[in-house]
Amino acid sequence: MKALVTGGAGFIGSHVVSRLLHEGWDEVVVIDNESSTCNEEFFWYTDKEARNYQYDIADYDNTRSLYDSVDVVFHLAAEARIQPAIENPLLAVKTNALGTATVLQCAREAGVKRVLYSSTSSAYGRNEPPCQEDMREDCLNPYSVSKVAGEKLCKMYYELFGLETVIFRYFNVYGDRQPLRGEYAPVVGLFLEQAKRGEPLTIVGDGEQRRDFTHVSDVVEANYLMATKDLPSEAFGQVYNVGTGKNYSVNELADMISDNQVHIPPRKGESRITLADNTRLRNLGWQPKVTIDTWISEQMRTTEL
């Protein structure tokens, strides 16, 4: 089996690459342009382990040939933060919509069997939790709009061209290798880094916004399961929530780490509550195994905080 991983040097993508190498896939191709401003470092494997290319996913001319003889594409590359997307909507649309269209077209032309697309729970916006996949989208920012555009392209490429696609909506992913740089870094890694430096944890708004924090290993397991499972035709072009089904407030998260806390102004375009109904993915054999409280406790035990 041969895989191509877009965003494969980033947080989640590098974990997917690790899993593929561990499982003994014949060849792994990685495309990543190192554009994420929240990453302090990128996680490239050696050329003996994977074939590495530092290209933009929207660059058809330089990436098209990389899809040849690929069996499965794991499409994780994205402009992946809400606030930067609000500041630069054009980049979000270029990367998340045009980039996804390019990935799908390259995969289609190369005869790829299956494409797994990483989308976002922010597609649900103000929907009443728990969020179910058949809810109407409520996009509050350019990031979620552009990611949902990618979802619709995936659905269309299956229905029109027969390219097997699977769409994941991730709920607040955290874990090893998580981005740590800047004020818009994901909150779990940001809080741990602030605590390590002896700084107050910067809680946005009143801190009562609730998030379904999902460990990266559970996200990788969802990807691997759906890449290798023999699925019925009705499973393709569909959305699957990847979340634990339990949420915590940002205040509760902060209290797990440090009582040195400050509140900063609220931000536009963000959901108040996220909570996954993960029944659809559970019915296919997936289940989350890591909880945020247990993971934080382990981090506090093994790290000098």
Image (spheres, rainbow, N blue to C red):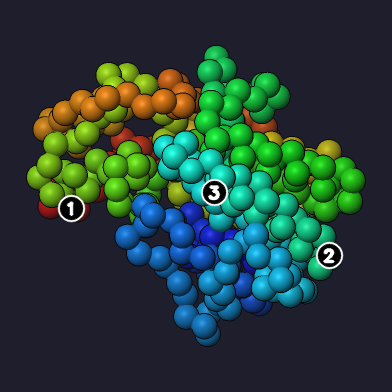
Above-or-below relation of 257 to 225: above
10 Å neighbourhood of mark 2: few (<14), some, or many (≥20)?
few
Q: Which quarter of the picture shows residue 264?
A: top left
Which is more N-terminal, label 1 or label 3? 3
Pick the quarter of the image with the N terminus.
bottom right
Above-or-below relation of 121 to 47: above
> Which numbered tag is attached to residue 109?
2
> Type of residue at label 3?
Leu
Which is more N-terminal, label 2 or label 1? 2
> Type of residue at label 2?
Glu
Residue found farthest to the bottom? 48
Look at the numbered discs 1 and 2 and tell me whether their residues touch, using CB distance below 8 Å. no
Residue 210 image point, x, y percent: 39, 23
Q: Is residue 124 visible?
A: no
Who's the residue at 66% across and 77% down the image?
Answer: 26
Who's the residue at 81% across and 68% down the image?
Answer: 110
Q: CA distance from mark 3 to mark 1?
A: 37 Å
Residue 200 image point, x, y percent: 14, 36
> Which numbered tag is attached to residue 303?
1
> Which numbered tag is attached to residue 91?
3
Q: Nearer the viewer, residue 29 or 17?
A: 29
| Helix, strand or loop under label 1 | loop
Which is more N-terminal, label 3 or label 2? 3
Q: Which quarter of the picture shows residue 168?
A: top right
Above-or-below relation of 279 to 38: above
